[in-house]
Amino acid sequence: MKKRLLVYAGMAFVCLTVLAVGFGVMMISFAPERTTPQSLAALTDKLRVYDDTHIQKVTVSPLPSGSASICGEAETVTYGPAITTTPENSGLKSWSVRTLTMGENGLWIGYAKGDDPNGVGVSHYDGKLWRFCGQMPNVNSIALDEQGNPWVGTDGLLVGTIPAPQKSLMHFENGVWVDYTSKLRDYRVRSVTFYRGILYVSTPFGLVEFDGNEWTISLSADLTSVLANDSSINSIAFTHGEMWLGTDRRVIRILVDGSYQIFGGPALVDSPVLGGDKIRKITVSPSDDQVWIAADPGDLAVYSYSTNEWTRYAIPRTRGVNDVEFDSAGRPCVATTDYGSGGVYCLDNGVWKNLVGAPTYTIAFGCDGCVFPRDELFAGTANNALIVGKALPHR
């Protein structure tokens, strides 16, 4: 009962509380801080090509006969949407939703680890039917290929007397889940991202890419050494022919000519550019002009290509920013956490407006051509399950 009361007390949904500058919003502009570019080999240097001898095909859940259209459909539950969707009134498997990805056929839901050392796993919801796709470790990221099939990046498992990693990178194909952990440089996957048909997988020990045929190390040895002490690459973004990497200690911008710039990190402790060194998410604006960088702990930093300037935003009542997404009107919305607070805030005419009043890890919007309309908002929270509502109205 106490948890239920916390759910409804924390919702504060669609109250659209206007939080003005005097209430804690801060925006500061800085001239760009550019480090001296250092030459390195081309970004696509192929340092090692993996073979296919250790691909493991596994069924992570019992598959009913003839039922493998979405993700195995090991369990199906039919419920209508609720403003606060919980394991008690839906097919959700956990109160802690770690990541959300919107596809044309519905919403993919990745759960935090929970109490089970084997994790909770992944679910799918199409507006009517919930499917439990199978148990997996702590889910950090989900990306969809051109066929709409999920690639799932997790913290992985170490199994056996001589520990062998499993279930770090899972792909649903031809009716079964395929385990690609053996292709990685580390069994802990932080992010999976598609760019121009290539899958990029980030781990604490670098970046691996898959073009559909070959698995290769994506970064040169020089840049890999720069990243050696950064603990993890948590987020990847592409724009203007450049790659942006967000790590536990800094942001690295890899330019078209292969040189790179470093923002933040131990050498730049007093750098005014970033809102924090532990980067959670990098997102490119729909116009491709801006790169939005979320830090936790910390706040929000934005780089503009058109002005070559950085801007900082302090989000009201928050300890850190976990996610940045854009609604159908092109407005940035952030998922934030704090001790007993946090939520979803969207920037509307210079003011951050609160849409969700519960600590939030991840957000997703419906889209044109999706089963969910583009004004539908989903918030995956730390302990209030899944909150469903509407985006800000179009002006």
Image (cartoon, rainbow, N blue to C red):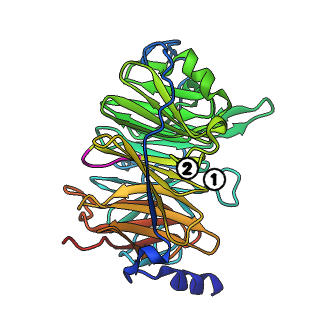
Q: Give the side of residue 310 with respect to residue 5, left or right.
A: left
Seen in the image, is 169 located left or right of residue 129? Answer: right
Q: Residue at x 67, y 38 (%)?
A: 266
| Residue 356 in view in this figure | no
Circle 2 — which element?
A: strand
What residue sits 32% from the left and 28% below the top? 241
Placement of 68 over or under 28, stated as above or below: above
Looking at the picture, which amino acid does disc 1 mark? Answer: Gly
Count of numbered marks:
2
Q: Residue furthest front?
A: 31
- Residue topped by disc 2: 139
Helix, strand or loop: magenta stretch: loop
Name the residue carrying label 1. Answer: 119
Near mark 1 (Cα within 10 A), the count class, few <14, some 14-19 or many ≥20, is: many
Tell me where residue 80 appears, x and y as whole percent.
35, 76
Q: Give the magenta part as a residue range.
A: 283-287
Q: Amino acid at mark 2?
A: Val
